[in-house]
Amino acid sequence: MNFIELQKILKDKLGIEHLADIARELETSPQAVSNWKARGKVPYKYVSKIRSKFNKIDSISSDIQNEVILTKNNEQKFYQNNKNFEEQAISLIDILLILVKHLKIIILVPLSICVITYFYVNLSYSPLYESTATIMSSSGGNQSQASGIASYFGVSMPNQSGPSWVYPEIIKSRTLARAVLKRKFDTETYGPDKSLLEILTYGNHNEKDKDFLTKKGIDKLLGMIEVESAGSNFLLKVVTFEAVFARDLALAIIEELDNHQAGYNKNKTSKGRQFTEERITNTESELKLAEEELKTFRERNRRFENSPSLMLEQQRLLREVSVLTGVFTTLKQQLETIKIEEVKDADYVLVMDPPEAPLYPKDSNKKQTLIFSGLFGILLSLIFIFLIEFILITNQNNDQSIKELKSLFFKNIPILNTLKRFTN
């Protein structure tokens, strides 16, 4: 059945002419009716609905019956396999029409955003520079002194060649950050010989604001630092607003990290020395008492060879003196080793790849920024266009519904027609 015939029949029988009225009468969407008009054909299921509505298919048109007989089987199979074909096709057509209708918006919005982004990148944007360094931990000292003493007495302790440093946690700690904030740097923006706290908080401040500014400076400094683990090495990254300042800050962080570890080992060595000196004092006292007991025993028992009990007592006293002498000697040796460790200058942080001043900013890819801004502009324009179309379609449907409601009221309530004529 042709769409023209459908329009003619509905116009003659019901006075329906507009596509929206036809869709409402046949209980389908206006998009589907528009698709029928474009193809010039009406699906069989709607022809059947028309036939049941008027109950006289022969009097409607002889062409309808012929078309129904020829296309009935094919159209039933078509609509079973492609139920959503009409909606999809009309949706694609509507989308293309909407895009062509609002082509100016699609071009102007992305272009405007790209222009704004270009001026921002070239005029208002502050570049950031990243300096990197590769570091690793040295042993930081010999075997623990307390562990060596304990092993002498037969106590098993884990053998540690040095502390197992956790660089990311140490570098990102507030303790290390406070030490770095006291360091002074030369910058082009803030001038020479300025502390890092002054640089990060934009100049000198009152003493009463020092605690607040220190916390603020710590947060900023930790945000500028990044540490990544690369096997046995660690990659330190420092991002600042100047290239040379980024390198100097990375060097300062490495130096403070080395000082932190040196202080840790010094504190540990001091505790070992204190423990060893106390043990030497106690052992020396015990050794003197054991030697006095042995001396007294020999003075009282000058002829003890014929007495097994006296010989056993002498062996016990000799063993006690021998053990205490060995402990005393070992402690003295350990004390000398600790004294050497205290004055030894060790490098606790090994710099495999020192930091350098970067030649270019970290995020200098302007083309990529412009491309992303253009894509964002296209997406924004599409959202704006479809939102406008949705609002217009909604308003149009509401107007049609109001008109239809008025028509039904006047048609079904005769008194309203009488009042209308009277007022006119």
Image: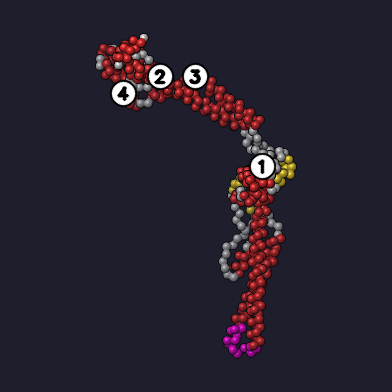
Looking at marks 3 and 2 on the same chain, the residue that comes earlier in the sequence is marked by 3
* Amino acid type at image mark 2: Asp
Please report contact status of discs 2 and 1: CB closer than 8 Å, yes or no: no
Q: Which percent across, then down, holds residue 385? A: 49, 24
Label 1 sits on a secondary structure element that is loop
Looking at marks 1 and 3 on the same chain, the residue that comes earlier in the sequence is marked by 3
**In this figure, which residue is indicated by the disc labeled 1?**
201
* Amino acid type at image mark 4: Gln
**Which mark is nearer the camera, 3 or 2?**
2
**In this figure, which residue is indicated by the disc labeled 4?**
76
The alpha-carbon separation of the residues under discs 4 and 1 comes to 77 Å
Looking at marks 2 and 1 on the same chain, the residue that comes earlier in the sequence is marked by 1
The alpha-carbon separation of the residues under discs 4 and 3 comes to 36 Å
Q: Which percent across, then down, holds residue 310? A: 60, 86
Looking at marks 2 and 4 on the same chain, the residue that comes earlier in the sequence is marked by 4
The residue under the point 59% across, 62% down is 159
The residue under the point 30% across, 12% down is 13
Q: Residues within 10 Å of mark 3 (few under 14, many from 20)?
A: few
Q: Quadrant of residue 65?
A: top left
Please report contact status of discs 4 and 3: CB closer than 8 Å, yes or no: no
The residue under the point 66% across, 62% down is 270
Quadrant of the rendering where the C terminus is positioned: top left
* Amino acid type at image mark 1: Thr
Q: Residues within 10 Å of mark 1 (few under 14, many from 20)?
A: some
**In this figure, which residue is indicated by the disc labeled 3?**
101
The label shown at residue 399 is 2
Q: Which percent across, then down, holds residue 386? A: 47, 25
